């Protein structure tokens, strides 16, 4: 053997060794990652589809995948109708040499996605032995049919080398094969057959097929060359639809159709909203329900596509899917480098430029979706910071160029569907926090936060069904509704009355009790809030700290509280409002014995100095009145004060009383009456005669009287008749007007009740002009007396109304022209200043 021959032999051995070393190295890596990598088992199907796309004929390719996971011959066979193999194709396939051409065409688009390189090697996770069946064709040669066995099962260089040589020798006899005259373009002439030899092979096959369902809608949209993909009995293709879903703008919707040969009437569609500029496209999954477009979540979809999915980018922090064929992906196609380098790197800069284009498209899609009131806009806000351990992204670049611009735009965009089913922005026009997102460590607390505030500021809350989604999205600039924040809101109202005005008719005591139950769920904040915040109403209605209040034992006479207030000791300010429930730790109790001691102590102190006593004359007078009305109890509770009650008068007051007594005696003589009661009756009759009320529409409406007969009947009531002038007689027109007021009040009250969750008015009926029955409240029957109160008053005349209101399941509702509301007994007692009444 000559030196030349030896050099040639050595060169051949080196060539095979290089090939075998590369294949062995990559197979070893694939074997080690195959069972633990989340992406490697899914990659095979996309590598095969990419290769088929690159050999399309006339811009289109069809793909067919045959799967048999069980039986005597479990296998996966991948077929396409693309171009035949060239000699280079066959050689590169055998030697695992990539023909990937990253050069761009005249339009600036990458020519091919990939061909027979490292990516194709990942298909060997299905089987380390692959049978390739195809047609060979060179421009100046005839068609030849061939079979090729690619064996990568060896574990050392010699075994891999021999497998490569064997495959190569089988391809070198193509000239000896007869010309293939049955070639028909458009038939499935190319096949890759993988035998599924073990459980791992079948697991990998299932993983690839599952990922096909997830990612294929996007691939068919981004890669127009793929016409159909068939995995019996299912066939995937783009549905022919109108390019624009809505007039104006560049956003369009397109759908992938999944036809099932075994269920031809059960076709499935997956729709996408797409926006493109140049080679960059963005897409989001949507459902099309007539005119309504609803955005769908896409958690399992890779966020980045280089025509085909870059598996592993499912967690890439971007709210929509981004595609560009000119992305420069990592070698395992699990992402793109967006890093900062000291030296210029055109590929990284190109990746960054593509992402900036995607951000601009995102802004256009966001505006379009918001302007057209798409549903589930919150999915467009799902963007977050880059984790610190990510090594593919320059965190500072991402924050400045992607995250911050997007979040600034989101704060002002109308993307939050509120509890009142309106779209609102996270911040108001002046930059203040407008939407408040329930935020807590537990889902239960977040839900109860929403329920608490839905009756307070529903316009500023996200829809209840969206609370959990927004909880995973919100960032620092958003309004976070924590238990502590809600406590701050309560404290800022200052009084129970102010809070009541905010609660849309809900009883403030009931609302507070719900809040206290919520407060106990938040163990981290509980102690701090109840000790530092003014969250508990006293009996004057002012919010106080828990430590400043005591519970009312319930036996303290109301007169004693009034007397103590007049004495300068505001006991109601120190007592917790009686309707407040819950155990809030060590809180003292004040009872009647305490009030008696305080009154005794205060009176003894203040009567010791006659100069000081003068300033507390109203308190002493109130105490003396109580003594006179409750003599027996007074002697028991206040034995010392009762015996020395003369000390409760000062000299000046005694003189005034003597003078008043003389004047009263003279007055009785002048009017020739025996006592004060006779004098009072005389004066009352005289005042009534001089100041009779005219009969107006407002007065008749207040009484709820709708006919002349009812008015005549009302005047038989002597006490009522004394109030009105007999010269003013109601007319028919007046009663017609009154009926319209009553009908208006009834209509507005029913409309208001329909908006309340705990009222059901679907079967209500008017059993009388002002009595509404057939209503359910919390599932229980309820009767309502409805009255117009446009003049600010209500006069209860009808006995039927009084009878209705005497039942437990009844309510009085009024409409004053602003907002219908329920009138409670407490409201009547407070506004009419009723402190006592017969029982």
Image (spheres, rainbow, N blue to C red):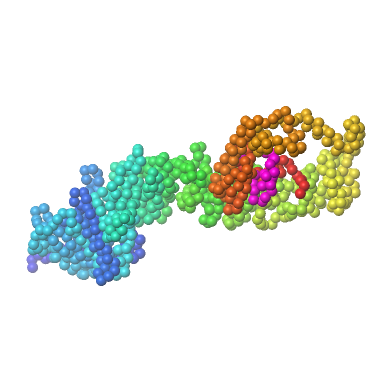
Would residue 340 be seen by someone viewing this image from the given angle?
no
Left or right relative to 724: residue 680:
right
- Magenta region: 792-815
Residue closer to the observer: 682 or 126: 682
> Which quarter of the figure is the N terminus placed in?
bottom left
Q: Is residue 802 magenta?
A: yes
Residue drawn where x is 81% and y is 31% of the image: 686
Residue 367 x, y percent position in the rendering: 40, 40
Residue at 33%, 56% (x, y): give it. 266
Above or below residue 566? Residue 149 is below
Which residue is at 30% across, 46% downward? 241
Position of 60 with respect to 665 (left or right) is left
380 or 671, which lies in front?
Answer: 671
Q: As rendered, which of 752 and 527 lies closer to the eye? A: 752
Q: Residue 521, how many percent across, how many down?
A: 58, 56
In the rendered image, is residue 374 in sight?
A: yes
The vertical placement of 827 against 25, above or below, is: above
Would residue 663 be counted in the magenta stretch? no
Q: Quadrant of residue 37?
A: bottom left
Q: Position of residue 198 (x, y in %)?
A: 29, 70
């Amino acid at each position: 053997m000559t030196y030349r021959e030896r050099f040639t032999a050595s060169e051949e051995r080196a060539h095979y060794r290089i090939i075998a070393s590369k294949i062995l190295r990559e197979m070893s890596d694939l074997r080690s990652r195959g069972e633990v990598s989340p992406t490697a088992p899914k990659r095979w199907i996309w590598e095969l589809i990419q290769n088929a796309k690159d050999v399309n004929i006339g811009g289109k390719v069809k793909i067919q995948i045959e799967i048999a996971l069980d039986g005597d011959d479990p296998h996966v066979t991948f077929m396409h109708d693309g171009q035949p193999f060239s000699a280079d194709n066959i050689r590169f396939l055998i030697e695992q040499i990539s023909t990937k051409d990253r050069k761009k065409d005249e339009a600036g688009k990458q020519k091919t996605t990939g061909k027979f390189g490292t990516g194709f090697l990942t298909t060997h996770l299905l089987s380390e032995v692959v049978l390739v069946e195809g047609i060979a064709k060179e421009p100046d040669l005839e068609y030849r049919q061939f079979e090729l066995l690619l064996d990568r099962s060896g574990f050392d260089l010699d075994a891999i080398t021999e497998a490569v040589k064997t495959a190569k020798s089988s391809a070198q006899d193509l000239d000896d094969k007869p010309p293939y005259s049955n070639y028909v373009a458009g038939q499935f002439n190319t096949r890759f057959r993988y035998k599924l030899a073990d459980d791992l092979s079948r697991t990998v096959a299932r993983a690839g097929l599952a990922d096909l369902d997830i990612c294929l809608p996007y691939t068919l949209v981004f890669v127009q060359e793929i016409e159909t993909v068939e995995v019996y009995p299912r066939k995937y293709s783009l549905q022919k639809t109108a390019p624009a879903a809505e007039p104006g703008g560049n956003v369009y919707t397109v759908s992938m159709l999944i036809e099932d040969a075994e269920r031809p009437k059960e076709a499935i569609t997956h729709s996408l909203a797409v926006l493109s500029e140049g080679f960059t496209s963005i897409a989001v999954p949507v459902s099309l329900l007539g005119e309504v477009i609803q955005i769908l979540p896409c958690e399992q979809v890779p966020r980045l596509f280089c025509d085909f999915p870059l598996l592993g980018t499912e967690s890439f922090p971007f709210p929509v899917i981004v595609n560009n064929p000119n992305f420069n992906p990592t070698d395992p196609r699990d992402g793109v480098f967006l890093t900062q380098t000291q030296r210029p790197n055109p590929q990284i800069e190109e990746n960054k430029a593509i992402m900036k284009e995607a951000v601009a498209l995102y802004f256009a899609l966001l505006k379009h979706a918001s302007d057209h009131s798409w549903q589930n806009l919150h999915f467009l806000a799902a963007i977050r910071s880059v984790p610190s351990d990510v090594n593919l992204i320059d965190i500072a670049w991402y924050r400045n160029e992607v995250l911050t611009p997007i979040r600034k735009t989101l704060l002002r965009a109308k993307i939050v569907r509120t509890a009142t089913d309106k779209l609102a922005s996270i911040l108001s026009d002046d930059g203040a926090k407008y939407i408040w997102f329930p935020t807590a460590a537990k889902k239960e607390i977040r839900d109860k936060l929403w329920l608490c505030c839905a009756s307070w500021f529903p316009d500023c809350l996200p829809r209840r069904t969206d609370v959990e989604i927004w909880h995973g999205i919100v960032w620092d600039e958003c309004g976070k509704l924590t238990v502590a924040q809600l406590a701050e809101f309560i404290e800022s109202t200052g009084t129970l009355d102010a809070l009541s005005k905010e609660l849309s008719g809900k009883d403030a005591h009931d609302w507070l009790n719900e809040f206290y139950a919520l407060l106990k769920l938040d163990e981290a904040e509980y102690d701090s809030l109840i000790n530092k915040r003014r969250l508990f109403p006293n009996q004057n209605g002012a919010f106080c700290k828990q430590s400043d209040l005591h519970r009312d034992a319930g036996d303290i006479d109301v007169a004693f509280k009034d007397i103590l207030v007049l004495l300068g000791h505001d006991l109601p300010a120190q007592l917790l409002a009686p309707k407040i429930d819950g155990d809030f730790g060590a809180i003292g109790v004040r009872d009647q014995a305490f009030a008696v001691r305080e009154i005794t102590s205060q009176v003894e102190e203040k009567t010791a100095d006659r100069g000081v006593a003068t300033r507390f004359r109203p308190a002493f007078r109130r105490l003396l009145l109580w003594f006179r009305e409750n003599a027996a109890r007074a002697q028991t509770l206040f034995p010392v004060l009762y015996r020395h009650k003369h000390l409760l008068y000062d000299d000046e007051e005694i003189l005034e009383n003597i003078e008043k007594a003389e004047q009263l005696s003279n007055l009785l003589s002048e009017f020739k009456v025996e006592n004060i009661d006779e004098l009072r009756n005389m004066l009352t009759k005289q005042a009534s005669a001089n100041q009779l009320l005219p009969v107006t529409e407002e007065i008749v409406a207040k009484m709820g009287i709708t006919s002349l007969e009812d008015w005549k009947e009302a005047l038989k009531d002597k006490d009522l008749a004394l109030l009105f002038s007999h010269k003013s007689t109601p007319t028919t027109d007046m009663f017609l007007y009154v009926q319209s007021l009553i009908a208006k009040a009834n209509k507005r009250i029913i409309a208001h009740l329909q908006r309340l969750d705990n009222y059901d008015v679907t079967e209500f009926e008017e059993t009388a002009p002002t009595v509404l029955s057939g209503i359910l409240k919390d599932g229980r029957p309820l009767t309502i007396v409805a009255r117009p109160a446009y003049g600010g008053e209500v006069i209860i005349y009808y006995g039927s109304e009084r009878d209705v209101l005497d039942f437990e399941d009844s309510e009085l509702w009024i409409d004053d022209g602003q907002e219908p509301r329920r009138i409670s007994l407490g409201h009547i007692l407070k506004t009419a200043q009723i402190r006592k009444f017969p029982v």
